[in-house]
Image (cartoon, grey):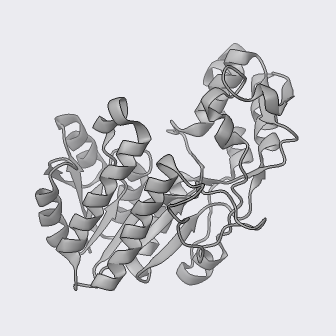
Amino acid sequence: MRVFVTGGTGHSGSYIIPELVAAGHEVTGLARSDQAAAALSALGAKVRRGDLQDLDRLKEAAAASDGVIHVGHRQDLLPSGGMNAVAAAEIPIMLAYGEALAGTGKPLVAAGSIGSPGRLGRPTTEDDPALPVGGEHKGTLRVRNDVEAAVIGLAEQGVRSSIVRIANIMHSTSDVGFLPMLIALAKEKGFAGYPGDGANLWNAVHVRDVASLFRLALEQGAAGKYWHGVEDGGIPFREIAEAIGSRLGLPVVSIPADELMVPGYFGFLANVVTQNYSASNLITRRTLGWEPLQPRLIADLGNGYYFPAHLEGS
């Protein structure tokens, strides 16, 4: 299969491309710079120069492919517009793919997020649609759900479109996301904190398992479906803090509600760390045959690469 991939040099994309190449697919990656082009070539992909702002070129690339995996984002919008602007820019991109792939039955697999709090006191499942866009659901969450709904809606136009919802924590040796932020925060404060009793559940997944899920969704995923790239269930936030504290040799402390916000321990992350993000992957495993094979989060925290400075000094 000829696969067009955006975001191929990012955290997930740099694992997705080798996964596709190893499975025998011919991969072309989008590159906006010489550095990105070299990185894509090193991963085994062909290079198509351009960027996510050029919708006509994206449509051309999609039409010339047998399938599309989209994990790229408009990073140029971050300084001025933040994540809300980045998410909003995804909608015209998805609609452009829809124009190129309409009526072909070709797959479009885009990245989503298990960033929506658990519903009704139960884990979120793949059958749960994106949250409604009104009422209490605002800001980046609202726009991101609009993006997911746009992708799923393309199934009605003859596109085999689906969303891979990725866990809050996607861990690996090249992780630059939420977990390194928590580790840096613990180092800065001198202790690893968790909100309240720390019983709220978070989800995680290894990036190599995410890569295999994108491949399976591309190869065999049905149209209009959500897939869950998560370890089943969830991890109490307290256990994550305890693992970080143990590796850093720091105390682990409960943060009361009135000390969570700015200028408290978690600052702008306070509204995120207090949420419950329990999610199930049962439908994904049963339908696609996906099985997470890599180390789970707590075990991976013990592998050392998240704490090189600490290990050197021990």
Residue 21 shows up from this direction: yes
Identity of the residue furthest to the top in this view: 313
Q: Is residue 155 above or below residue 164?
A: below
Left or right of residue 161, residue 4 in this image: left
> Does residue 229 appear to the left or right of 144 in the view shown?
right
Near-viewer residue (85 or 160): 85
Q: Position of residue 235 (x, y in %)?
A: 76, 52
Choose between 111 and 220: the one closer to the eye: 111
Residue closer to the observer: 259 or 133: 133
Q: Tell me where residue 187 appears, x and y as whole percent.
A: 69, 19
Residue at (12% x, 65% y) in the render: 60
Above or below 79: residue 277: below
Answer with the quarter of the image where residue 267 lies: top right
Q: In the picture, which quadrant includes the C terminus?
A: top right
Q: Position of residue 13 (x, y in %)?
A: 38, 52
65 or 135, nearer to the observer? 135
Horizontal relation, residue 28 to residue 118: left or right: left
Image quadrant for the N terminus? bottom left
- The residue positioned 72% from the left and 17% from the top of the image is 189
Q: Is residue 82 placed above or below 86 in the rendered structure?
A: above
Q: Is residue 278 above or below residue 266?
A: below
Count of residue discs: 0
Left or right placement of residue 126 versus residue 157 in this view: right
Residue at (74, 45) in percent of width and height:
298
Counting from the top left corner in percent of width and height, residue 136 is at: 60, 55
Residue 307 in view here? no
Tell me where residue 292 sits by quadrant: bottom right
